[in-house]
Image: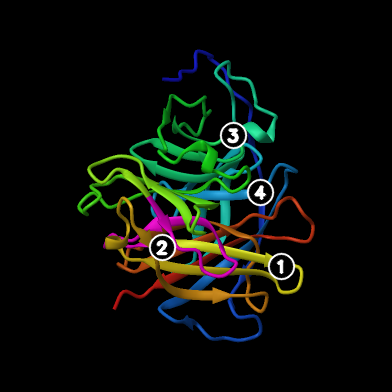
């Protein structure tokens, strides 16, 4: 058990976010449908603080509006999305950032210690996956000042099997009514077993145990979220100097996610540099007021002038 005894925390800084609207996903074309996904709109974001960027994961606290996220440089971020009447995002407001802190309440400056990559949110608790110094940690959510973690979870996968910079990028919770009974599931980016499959685990509940995800091509897993029916949607990314960056969405049937199994699924979307993508790293799935199921994606710019911070939104048609 970890506790924070400090009465102070790292300073929370407001950040002004400027945006450029994205109305076409396929650059120069006005098509809306990409398989079962319908493009809603997106934003290219820049921030007034040099700390803004490196957005590695996020989850909505209130569906489609207030959100919390983590960066792989060791910051928490909070904000809200403003929308047009038809639901298209058009602005980011109330955005703040705060450096992660140790048990004494002091900011942690070593990236090795705070390379946050995955995030789940439930009942005021943020569960975060860290790589390099591999761990799954839980924090009480407090937008006024985040403290140190209060608990570390057993992630089951032997630490020796986790690659230094290819650890847990996905931390997500299964539906409570499904066979996994709301259990937390973690998936690594590219920590491979002897057969070349990606290590993952159900870390609590009746189905607790290690499983793997079949690796397809040169794509690595950067995030995931469960759909209401218990299927797992995975966000994947590849990069090469020859072809640049690509992204992919793959759907894993809920029945495939079980101890000892090698899970695999169908590709819903694949996009390259002809589309409005970048280094896509974060994802959430949520239900809009009109009942539509929405997939939201964010990119990590690695604090590079050659990359962008993007927010993209799609309707996932369920029929």
Q: Tell me the number on the disc at residue 240.
A: 1
Image: 206 above or below 234:
above
Residue position marked by numbered label 2 in the rendering: 233
Which one is in front in this view, the residue at disc 2 or the one at disc 3?
3
Q: How far apart are marks 1 and 2 (CA)?
A: 24 Å
> Do tag 4 and tag 1 residues touch (Cβ < 8 Å)?
no
N-term mark: 2 or 3: 3
Q: Tell me residue 235's x, y (percent).
A: 50, 62
Q: Nearer the viewer, residue 230 or 308?
A: 230
Q: Tell me residue 60's x, y (percent).
A: 43, 50
> Dot 1, crowdedness within 10 Å: few (<14), some or many (≥20)?
few
SS under mark 1:
strand
Left or right for 284, reference 48: left
Which one is in front in this view, the residue at disc 1 or the one at disc 2?
1
Q: In which quarter of the image is the N terminus?
A: top left
> Dot 4, crowdedness within 10 Å: few (<14), some or many (≥20)?
many
Q: Tell me the number on the disc at residue 133.
A: 3
Q: Tell me residue 85's x, y (percent).
A: 44, 68
Tell me if I can see residue 85 in this picture. Answer: no
Residue in the image at 34% along x and 69% along y: 292
Magenta extent = 211-232
N-term mark: 4 or 1: 4
Magenta segment: does it hold 227? yes
Q: Distance between the residues labelled 4 and 1?
A: 20 Å
> Dot 2, crowdedness within 10 Å: few (<14), some or many (≥20)?
many
Residue position marked by numbered label 4 in the rendering: 54
N-term mark: 3 or 4: 4
């Amino acid at each position: 058990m970890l506790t924070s005894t400090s009465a102070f925390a790292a300073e929370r800084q407001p950040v002004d976010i400027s945006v450029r609207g994205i109305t076409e996903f396929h650059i120069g074309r006005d098509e809306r449908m990409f398989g079962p996904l319908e493009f809603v709109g997106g934003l290219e974001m820049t921030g007034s603080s040099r700390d803004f960027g490196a957005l590695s994961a996020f989850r909505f606290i209130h569906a489609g509006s207030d959100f919390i996220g983590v960066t792989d440089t060791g910051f928490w971020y909070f904000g809200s999305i403003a929308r047009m009447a038809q639901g298209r995002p058009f602005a980011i407001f109330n955005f703040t950032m705060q450096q992660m802190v140790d048990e004494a309440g002091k900011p942690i400056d070593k990236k090795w210690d705070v390379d946050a990559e995955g995030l789940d949110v439930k009942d005021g608790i943020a569960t975060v996956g860290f790589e390099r110094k591999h761990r799954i940690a839980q924090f009480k959510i407090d937008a006024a000042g985040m403290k140190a973690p209060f608990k570390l979870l057993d992630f089951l996968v032997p630490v020796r099997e986790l690659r230094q910079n290819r650890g847990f990028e996905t931390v997500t919770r299964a539906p409570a009514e499904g066979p996994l009974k709301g259990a937390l599931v973690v998936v690594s980016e590219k920590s491979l077993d002897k057969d070349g499959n990606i290590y993952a685990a159900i870390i609590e509940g009746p189905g607790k145990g290690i499983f793997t995800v079949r690796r397809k091509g040169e794509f690595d897993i950067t995030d995931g979220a469960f759909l209401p029916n218990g299927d797992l949607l995975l966000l994947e990314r590849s990069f090469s100097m020859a072809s640049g960056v690509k992204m992919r969405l793959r759907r894993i049937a809920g029945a495939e996610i079980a101890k000892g199994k090698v899970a695999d699924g169908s590709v819903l979307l694949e996009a390259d540099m002809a589309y409005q993508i970048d280094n896509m790293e974060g994802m959430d799935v949520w239900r809009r007021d009109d009942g539509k199921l929405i997939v939201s994606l964010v990119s990590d710019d690695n604090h590079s002038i050659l990359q962008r911070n993007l927010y993209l939104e799609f309707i996932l048609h369920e029929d």
